[in-house]
Amino acid sequence: MSQIKTIHNPIGSLERFLDLLLISLIVYMTLKGGTSGACAACKYQRRRCAADCPLAPYFPAEQPKLFQNVHRLFGVRSIVKILENLDELQRPEAMKSIIFQSYVRDRNPVHGCLGITQQLQYMIWVAEEELKAVNSQLQLYRSGQNHPMMIHEIGEKQEDLDLGMGLPVNNNNQGNNTIPFFSPVSETQQQQPHMSYCSDQVNNHDYNPIPDSCKEVLNNHNTSLAWGQNQFPYNHHNYGFINQNEHCSETKNNNSVMAIQSQLVNLQMASNQQEEEVDDQNYDEIHQFLEIIDESQSFTETKEVYASSSGESLKEPIDEIGEKELRRAATCFSLTSVN
Amino acid sequence: MSSSYSNYTNSPCAACKFLRRKCTSDCVFAPYFPPEEPKKFANVHRIFGASNVSKILQEVEPHQREDAVNSLAYEAEARLRDPVYGCVGAISVLQRQVLGLQRELEETNADIMRYASCLGGETTSVYGARRG
């Protein structure tokens, strides 16, 4: 019933482990200065790579594109300034996030990481709505145990649903279901052309900041964004609630059981429509990459540093960042502690 | 006259104010960095630099530039607040939320399956009782 699939399968775990191993190996090699000669940063700038080059540990010569992305977005001076203000233990983590951010910006020059944030916020909203509907159904079942005659009715409805007959659902475009929209998105994005990347770019062995399994989600990220914008018509001055698409309209059926069942059907239809355009791997692959980020934290033994220095500050980006962009996000969900 | 084209008025855009230069009619920053939001450009300049932002704007279509600027402003502010993880930290937090919700959904669905399987027996017994 849930449209968000679990990735807790043995093969997926093994792939994740191998990806983590690969990433760890790359990080280990870069940190230990496993490569000789000029680093990618110094090669790009055509200067001599000193022994104490601050960027050498993070930009191996074999991956010039990594540095090119970072250079295009941040610039060398900005990176060096960021690193200088951090502890030794925090620098690898910071560089990983910078490299990822630059990679995402390279793949999607318009939205960058904000696009992923919006996508996740939408997924949270869908999951919360589904949870509400499912909890309501569960309540009915529980109350049905106290009122045996209801059990028969619930059972009939469940059978209808299982047989795919569904329930009368009002698919009228006049439905006024609204969904919270947490970040501003421009109307112009509805005309945004699909930007996809050729597989040869993705498979370029000179350009591998993240595991292969995560590349496809970023590859699909552009198309999903174009879809996402169609779901979120934008009003620059309205960061609140907007009309949802026609497949998620409210039912007008007064029967509580049917209302809840039809809510579930609507959510499923909405999610199914999304799945037609959004690859299921989007969620799985983003999750895999972020699992790798999380697990690599423990690998580099920066947990305490991260918790002390960033645990609170992480709350700030959500609660306070972007008076215009993230105010609604802060009110709509609460942060969990990172560790 | 649109307020975004502040170079036509006496007030230069936030970018030109910050950079202390003349705001010309073809200033690439003027439409997206109004003088009322000086912090927006200051943050973006501090993290990414004016020339990088200018290059990014020139690489995207004109109708996409506002969104590009907004996303850059968001990322810049996130990086200033959290120099280690920036906006990637927010992504990680959201991802955890999604995982938590997924877990909760699975548990709730499992409960429903349990009730549904009970229902199968109950329904049969109800039918049996009615026929009886």
Image: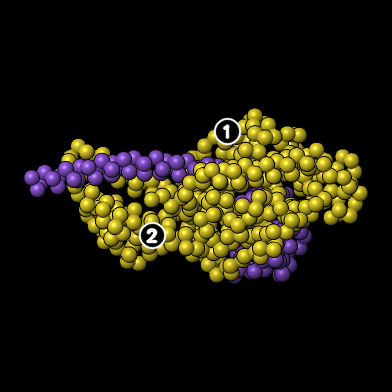
Chain colours: A yellow, B purple
**Element on which disc 2 rests:** helix
Q: Which image quadrant: the C terminus of chain A?
A: top right
Residue at 82% in and 50% down: A61
Q: Nearer the viewer, residue A189 or A269?
A: A269
Q: Nearer the viewer, residue B50 or B95?
A: B95
Q: Is residue A174 left or right of residue B42?
A: left
Residue A316: % across, % down:
58, 40
Residue positioned most to the left: B132
Amino acid type at mark 1? Asn
Pointer 2 indicates a residue of which chain?
Answer: A
Among numbered discs 1 and 2, the one appearing first in the sequence = 2
Q: Would you say residue A183 is visible in this rendering?
A: no
Q: Nearer the viewer, residue A156 or A229?
A: A156
Residue B113: % across, % down:
32, 43
Residue at 61% in and 52% down: A213
Q: Is residue A38 left or right of residue B100?
A: right
User: Cα distance, mark 1 to mark 2?
Assistant: 36 Å
Pointer 1 indicates a residue of which chain?
Answer: A
Residue A69: % across, % down:
73, 55
Q: Residues within 10 Å of mark 2 (few under 14, many from 20)?
A: some
Question: Is B95 above or below relative to A226?
Answer: above
- The residue that mark 2 highlights is A269
Q: Nearer the viewer, residue A64 or A76?
A: A64
Q: Are marks 1 and 2 in contact (CB under 8 Å)?
A: no
- The residue that mark 1 highlights is A339
Residue positioned most to the right: A48
